[in-house]
Image: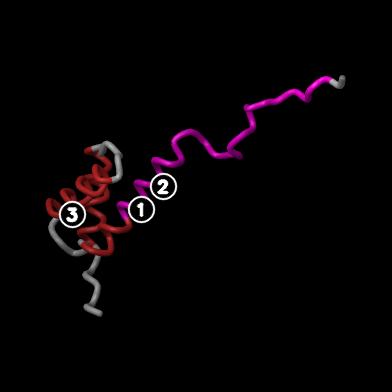
Amino acid sequence: MEPLAAVSYASSGGGRTAGWQAQVRIDYAINRVAQTHRGQSEDQVAQAIHDQLRAIGVVPNGRKVAQYATAISALPQLPPK
């Protein structure tokens, strides 16, 4: 009977770093808010970011939410379709 080949789990999952799924979720939520709330007040944008992140299971970081809200509120509003 031949010996079984050794199995190594160290390289499974590719070359992605830990936490990459959370970052994808954050990017998705920020992009959604950027499309719908650009040009609005920082408070409205921050609340929308907070709500979107909580809806997808990410605990919001207050400092990062404030940075994103400042940037999104400074964007011009999109013209209606």
Cα distance in 3D space between marks 1 and 3: 15 Å
Q: Amino acid at mark 2?
A: Val
Q: Is residue 71 left or right of residue 47?
A: right
Q: Which residues are magenta?
A: 3-30
Eyeballing the image, is 56 above or below 30? above
* Residue sitting at the far right: 1
Tell which of 13 and 2 is nearer to you. 2
Image quarter hosting the C terminus: bottom left
Of the numbered discs 2 and 3, the one sitting upstream in the chain is: 2
Where's residue 47, x and y in %?
A: 16, 49
Please tell me whether residue 29 belongs to the stretch shown in magenta.
Answer: yes
Secondary structure of the residue carrying tag 1 is helix
Q: Amino acid at mark 3?
A: Val
Q: Residue at x 24, y 42 (%)?
A: 54
Residue 24 bears which disc, if any?
2
From the image, tell me which residue sits under label 3: 45
Checking the image for residue 28, the label placed there is 1
**Residue at x 64% of width, y 32% of height:** 11
* Secondary structure of the residue carrying numbered label 3: helix
Please rate how many residues cluster around mark 1, counting C-alpha atoms within 10 Å: few if below 14, some from 14 to 19, many from 20.
Answer: some
